[in-house]
Image: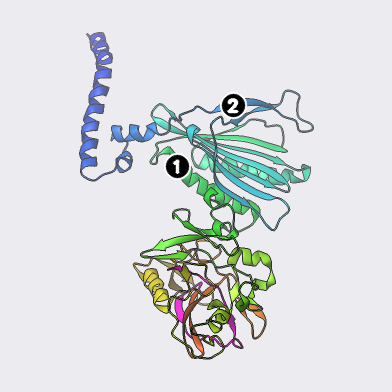
Amino acid sequence: MRKFFLVLSLWLSPFLLFFTLVTACSESEKKVASGYTEEQNAWDIQDTVAYLKLLKTWEPAQPVDSSREELTILGAPEDAFWYDIVFLSDASKHYAYANPKGPVGICDVIVYSDENGIRLMVNLDSTMEYYTQVLRRDSMFAVVTDRLDKTYENRNSIAACGEDSLAFVEQCEASKGTVVDQLGIGCMELHLICTKEIMPKKTASEFLDSTAKEMKARCADAMGVSLNVMGNGDERFIGKAPWRYMNPEISYGEVVDERDGQVYKTVTIDSLVWMAENLNYADSVSTPSLLGKSWCYNNEPDSCAKYGRFYTWGAAIDSVALANDPENPQQCGNGTYCRELSNLQGLCMEGWHLPSSAELNFLDDVASRGTPTVAIVDEKTDDPTYGPSTLRSAYLWNYGIDTYGLSLLPAGYYLFDTDSFERNGSVAFFWSLDYAEEYAWMFTMYDEKFSFNTHVGINEKYMYAISIRCVKD
């Protein structure tokens, strides 16, 4: 009789499982209908249907392949080898960075969507590192496979090799993973694998995306630079230097300056279209107002490529063109009050104009509209202060989140009365067309605060040359 019940139980098991899934499906659908997302449901393993849907994303469209690689380092046994991962699907570059200050310093993060894989490649003077993660499904669990393949330049790197190996093992064991050393013959090369089973709470693509951010941090650490100088590395922004610091979540437009062929990114904020980078126009032959009235930070052309040029206010409004206006010549820019300047092109390209103080105040309103603030700790008092960060690029500043894509960079400014360049990395200023006697309105942003400042003389003997951002007519 006992055997009969055992057989009956085994025979009924598939039906019981089916009944459980159907019941869970019904419960899951109720939850989704009540406002729960499938991802929220999947946090509970008992919600089988939502969990299986999430787990299904871990089934790669194309299985990962592998190849046997012979070990070629001096002193290795003749039969030493390891199995390398070979991605067969098309790759997409998620992030790229080349260290401009070092002879060798290149970092790429590559995503293989069809194979649920992602790879970090870091090439330095002394090491070449591949850090690879592959995601797959195994029965009712997701499997994360992390690989570290790293070669060292010479035997002087043995200590570093040992430290890297120990760190990898500790990280794997802390996440309840299993480590395999494919070589185990010394420390000139590392070929380590960490495999761990998890119950996923994210889709495979979300998991890879968060891994990509971790890989970028790993790259910054390897190169000895901070994350906020590395830029976003988005493929869309390969080209001009300032593009690397733009918000990859924003859809930018473009405008061509027909005067010199330069292309500028643009961004729409409510009803206004702004340049999303600083003007870098320098033709003083076609525009005589520029002669001796614009500068690159520290007189370095690379600074102009990155931050744009600094202009006096007289140059910004194109005072020579105003003075030579055949219908209504005006002597502006030398402390002389002239006509009210409205919708003035100034140095901007055709169809664009210098912003008015009203348009700058509009930016002030935007920055303050439900502004997320960032805590800034005063180094002297350890007390936090708070400042809006929505208009600053997320890079190069200490604090910035670039919510609207204006991507302001901390260009600094030039004091032409003392011939000194100041505060690159901590402030951003750009001109308005409005002025009152000796003072012109300017937009000013510091690393810790946001304000407008009218205490800048427009007389060319007075202090400032700053950046220009144009607005579309």
The residue located at (45%, 42%) in the rendering is 207
As measured in the structure, the alpha-carbon distance from the residue carrying label 1 to the one carrying label 2 is 22 Å
Would you say the magenta stretch is mainly helix, strand or loop?
A: loop
The residue located at (26%, 9%) in the rendering is 3
Q: Which mark is residue 359?
A: none
**Residue 403 showing in the rendered view:** no
Q: Nearer the viewer, residue 172 or 145?
A: 145
Q: Which residues are magenta?
A: 446-473
- Mark 1 touching mark 2, by CB under 8 A? no
Q: Position of residue 126 (x, y in %)?
A: 73, 47
Q: Secondary structure at mark 1?
A: helix
Q: Which residue is mark 1?
A: 207
Tell which residue pokes out farthest to the right in this image. 74
Q: Nearer the viewer, residue 108 or 323?
A: 323
Task: Give yes or no for residue 453 being in the magenta stretch.
Answer: yes
Q: Amino acid at mark 1?
A: Phe
Q: Which residue is mark 2?
A: 66
Indicate left or right for 425 with 393 as reference: right
Colour logic: rainbow
Q: Position of residue 281 (x, y in %)?
A: 59, 68
Q: Position of residue 132 (x, y in %)?
A: 57, 38
Q: Nearer the viewer, residue 383 or 150?
A: 150
Q: Earlier in the sequence, mark 1 or mark 2?
A: 2
Question: What is the crowding at mark 2: few (fewer than 14 residues within 10 Å), some, or many (at least 20)?
Answer: few
* Quadrant in which the N terminus appears: top left
Q: Nearer the viewer, residue 263 or 172?
A: 263
Q: Secondary structure at mark 2?
A: strand
Q: Amino acid at mark 2?
A: Ser
In this view, 295 is above or below 169: below
Image quarter of residue 311: bottom right
